[in-house]
Image: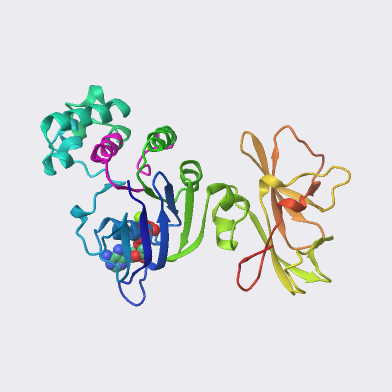
């Protein structure tokens, strides 16, 4: 088993297109790292650089003790799973899974054994003689996974492997993937734009935006302590409220409410306050920070109502997520903003303030 390191990786297509700027990451054995970010932020390019399908402009890829930057893809002992599955249409499931092993001149008894093991784990036993055209999307993706698993590679790379599946199936295969990779010891790098996949599968998440690493942390940390305003807005659904507020005497002014600033914000004129909709709640006596406002929209999400509230005495609106069994009367509502759930960001740098 071998850890994967990428060091100061840069890919410049032309002066205006630099999808990977200066990326350094380490993925240890057994770690599941997700590259998460919006479309076009450089995720696939990073994966292709690791796989050797592209050459970096600068920087290195290291697997175990070996610098593999200038090795061809075939010599890197990496297995990759693509969104498009990339199966051979004329081969049946067995041969598709076995294809990588045959290329490596493995004995046929070993091949049979490994394919049987993967097919059992992935529930493919009844499908071995079918061609890809006779399989559903979920089954095809399981075959593609099987082909990667039997290789027993030094590193697994997966590029949006679930995004061609419909929502229900995606949830199911996601759970299967999690169980599958918990049993693997090799480093896994997984690419997705879907925050739920990143949160549920990963031991660590690297949030990327415009070719730059924004934050690298375990999923819970990314959610509870976003490093900057981009991460705060990108992670979490419904999205975090992010309000640019005027400040006076070390307090931020939100409508008729004054909220004490963190000590690291030294007399700013403006500041950005973040609060997740799910962290607001109906006010109870004794709450220190509450706001009052008019409810102008209620969206029923089943388990909870998403309220859009126009803050009284201000221009801001806040979205609050309340369990459906919590009711309020009339159009006016008071909600608490618990102080331990407030996030503060510098207006200029957009970085988190403590
Ligand atoms: N071969 C290429 N030539 C020029 N630009 C490219 C090439 N491949 C990708 N890009 C650009 O690099 C950026 C990042 O692409 P990509 O890594 O595929 O993003 P993601 O996977 O995060 O959606 C995009 O703006 C894309 O248009
Ligand atoms: Mg991509």
The image quadrant where one finds ligand 1 is bottom left
Q: Give the quarter of the figure containing the C terminus.
A: bottom right
In the picture as drawn, the residue positioned furthest to the right comes out as 285
Rendering quarter of residue 146: top left
Looking at the picture, how far across and down is residue 169, in whole percent?
A: 40, 33
Residue drawn 85% across the image and 42% down it? 284
Q: Quick one: 117 or 199, which is closer to the camera? A: 117
Q: Which colour scheme is used?
A: rainbow
* 160 part of magenta stretch: yes
Residue 207 lies, with reference to residue 304, above or below; the image says: below
Looking at the picture, how far across and down is residue 102, in whole percent?
A: 12, 39
In the picture as drawn, the residue positioned furthest to the top comes out as 126
Q: Quick one: 148 or 135, which is closer to the camera? A: 148
**Which region of the structure is painted magenta?**
142-169
Residue drawn 78% across the image and 51% down it? 294
* 294 part of magenta stretch: no
Residue drawn 53% across the image and 48% down it? 219
Looking at the picture, how far across and down is residue 341, in whole percent?
A: 71, 51
Looking at the picture, how far across and down is residue 321, in whole percent?
A: 68, 43
């Amino acid at each position: 088993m071998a850890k994967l390191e990428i060091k100061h990786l840069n890919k410049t297509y032309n002066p205006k297109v630099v999808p990977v700027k200066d990326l350094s990451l380490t993925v240890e054995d057994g770690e599941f790292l997700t590259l998460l970010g919006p479309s076009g932020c450089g995720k696939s390019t990073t994966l292709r650089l690791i796989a050797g399908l592209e050459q970096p402009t600068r920087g290195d890829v290291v697997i175990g003790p070996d610098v593999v930057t200038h090795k061809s893809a075939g010599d890197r002992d990496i297995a990759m799973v693509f969104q498009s599955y990339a199966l051979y249409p004329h081969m049946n499931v067995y041969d598709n899974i076995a294809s990588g092993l045959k290329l490596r001149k493995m004995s046929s008894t070993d091949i049979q054994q490994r394919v049987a093991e993967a097919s059992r784990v992935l529930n493919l036993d009844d499908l071995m003689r079918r061609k890809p055209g006779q399989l559903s999307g979920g089954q095809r993706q399981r075959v593609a996974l099987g082909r990667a698993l039997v290789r027993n590679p030094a590193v697994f790379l997966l590029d949006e492997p679930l995004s061609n599946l419909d929502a229900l199936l995606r949830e199911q295969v996601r759970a299967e993937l999690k169980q599958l990779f918990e049993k693997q010891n090799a480093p896994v790098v997984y690419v997705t734009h879907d925050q739920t996949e990143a949160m549920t599968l990963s031991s660590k998440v690297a949030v990327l935006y415009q070719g730059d690493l924004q934050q690298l942390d375990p999923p819970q940390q990314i959610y509870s302590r976003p490093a900057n305003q981009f991460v705060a807005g990108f992670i979490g659904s419904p999205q975090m409220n992010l309000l640019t507020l005027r400040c006076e005497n070390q307090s931020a002014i939100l409508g008729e409410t004054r909220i004490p600033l963190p000590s690291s914000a030294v007399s700013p004129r403006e500041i950005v306050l973040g609060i997740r909709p799910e962290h607001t709640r109906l006010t109870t006596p004794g709450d220190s920070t509450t706001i009052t406002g008019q409810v102008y929209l209620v969206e029923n999400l089943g388990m909870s109502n998403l309220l859009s509230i126009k803050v009284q005495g201000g221009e801001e609106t806040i979205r609050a997520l309340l369990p459906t069994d919590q009711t309020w009367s009339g159009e006016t509502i008071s909600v608490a903003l618990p102080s331990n759930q407030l996030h503060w960001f510098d207006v200029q740098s957009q970085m988190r303030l403590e």
